Image (cartoon, rainbow, N blue to C red):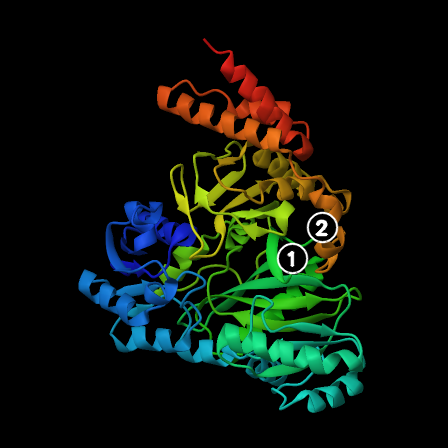
Amino acid sequence: MLKKVLVANRGEIALRVVRACQELGIRSVAVYSDADAHAPHVREADEAVHIGPAPSRESYLDGERIIAAAKAAGADAVHPGYGFLSEREWFARAVREAGLVWVGPPAEAIAAMGSKTAARTLAVAHDVPVVPGTTEALPDAAAAKKVAKTFGYPVLLKAAAGGGGKGMRVVRTAAELPEAWESARREARNAFGDDAVYVEKYIEGPRHVEIQVLADHHGTVIALGERECSVQRRHQKMIEEAPSPAVSPELRARMGAAAVRAAKAAGYRNAGTCEFLLARDGNFYFLEMNTRIQVEHPVTELVTGVDLVQWQLRIAGGERIPFPDTMEPRGWAIECRITSEDPTNGFLPSTGRIECLHVPSGPGVRWDGGVESGSEVGLHYDPMLAKLIVWGSSREQAVDRMHRALRELIVAGVETSREFHLRVMEDAEFRAGAIDIQWLERRLPSLLGAAPSVAERQAAAIAAALIADADRRGTRHTAQAVASESASGAGVASAWATLARREALRP
C-alpha cells in the first residue's frame, strides 16, 4: 500500500482524493496556488505545499514544480485527479522517472489513447466499433471534402488531440466545409497546440453513453457498467446518471466487453472510461478513452458500491481487483454539476465571494464540493464548484430526490446553475428519459424561462445575509423553509422573499 500521496489538483476532486487517502490510512499532500491558500482541500490534507501564483500555467500545470513538491514532502506517489496534467503522457512519464508512483494508467496507455485518430485505429484493430470516418488526420479542406462526399453529409470535423467539444464542427453541406475546417483547426491549435483534424460521419440524435473500467497490474480488466451523459451544452456534460435509461442488460454486456477490449489493447491500468455514441437503432460506436478518473464517477460508485478513487490508490499500490468481470447496477444515481455560471445570461462565469452555503442532506444525498461559505470564486479555474449526487431505488425516485436536494441547496454571493438543474428535473421529457446529445440545445430556451427580477435577487441576498447571521448565532432553522415553501424551481425567488420577511420579523 502507498504511504504518502501528493494530490496534483485542486477543488472538489483534490478533496475527494484526500478523503480516500484518509480512509485507507495513507498520508496526503495538497498543493495550492496563491488563490487556493485557504481552500478546503488544503486544510483537510495532512500536509500542503505552495506551488505558485494563481494562473494554472504557473502552478497546477507546472509539472516540474509539482514533482519537486512531491519529493520535498517525501511522497511516494502522485494522484493527478482530472483535468490539468491528468492526461499528459509526458507528466506521467516524468513522475515515473522521478521514482514516484503514478496513480493512473501507464504513460504508454495515455499516449495510445491521447490521439483520437490513434485510438480509433487501435479500436478498429481490436473489433471495437467506431463511427465511420478517417483513422488519421487530413491535410486540408479539399481532402476532407472528398471524405465527406464518400460518407455523405452531415459530417463532423474533430480535433485529433481534442476533448470537451474543442475543435469540433458539424458540417451539413459542402459549401460550409472550408470555413468550418479552418475554424476547427484554429480552435484545436489554441486549445491543444495541435491543429490536426479528421472527419467522421455525423450521427443524428445519439446518446452519449460511457463505460467505466478498472484494470490492475495482474491482467484483470473489468467493466463496471455505463453512465448516461447526454445532457450536454456545447459538448460539455451538465447532468449524468447511472445506469442509462436506454441500455438493456444485453447491451450493457456488449458495450462492457468492447470497453474491456479497448482497454486491454492499450495496455491499460487503473481507472478509465470508454466513451461511446449510442445510436437510435441500438448500434454503438467508440469515441475515445478518458485515461483518468471522470468528473461523473460518483454515480457509478453509488450504483456499484465500488469506491473508484480508493481503488485507483489500491491498484497503484499493487492490489488485485476482487470484483466480478461485470457488475449490474443497483438502483439509480444522478449527478448535477453545480457551476458558478449564470444560465440566464448565456452561462457566463460568475465571480465573487460565497457569502452563504447551505448543503443539502437527507437520505441518498451526496455532496462532493470544493468550496464553503467565505470561498472566493475567481476566473483562473473551471467554474465547477461542486457536484450534487443522489441515489434512489428507481430513476423516478432519484429524479424526485435530486429535485428536493436542489431546493435545499443555497449558494449566495455568486450565480450558479442550481435553478437550471431544478427546471431540468421538472421537465417532462427528461423525466421520461427521452434525451439525446442534442436534447438540451433544443430545450434550453424553455428551461431557462425568465430571469429573476432585481427585487427577487435583492430578497435572495437579504435572506442569505440573515441566514449567515443565524448560523453565527446558532439559531438557524430556515433552509428547510426555503425548500418547503418553494413549490417549483420558478418559485425559489418568491420563497426567498417569504424567508426574508419571516426573518425580519424574528424577535
Q: Position of residue 445 (x, y in %)?
A: 74, 48
Q: Residue furthest front?
A: 454
Q: Nearer the viewer, residue 261 or 111?
A: 111
Number of numbered callouts drawn? 2
The mark that comes first in sequence, 2 or 1, is 1
Disc 2 to disc 1: CB gap under 8 Å: yes
Q: Position of residue 220 (x, y in %)?
A: 47, 70
Marker disc for residue 63: none
**Please, what is the three-letter code of the amino acid marked with disc 2?**
Leu
Q: Secondary structure at mark 2?
A: helix
**Please, what is the three-letter code of the amino acid marked with disc 1?**
Arg
The residue labelled by disc 1 is 233
Quarter that holds the C terminus? top left
Query: Relative to 437, is 485 above or below?
Result: above
Q: Would you call the spot at circle 1 few (<14 residues within 10 Å), some (14-19), or many (20 or more)?
A: some
Query: Relative to 105, is 308 above or below?
Result: above
Distance, label 2 to label 1, CA atoms, is: 9 Å
Q: Secondary structure at mark 1?
A: strand
The residue labelled by disc 2 is 444
Q: Is there any visible trace of residue 376 in the rendered image?
A: yes
- Tell whether 461 sits left or right of 421: left
- Tell whether 188 sits left or right of 376: right
Quarter that holds the N terminus? bottom left
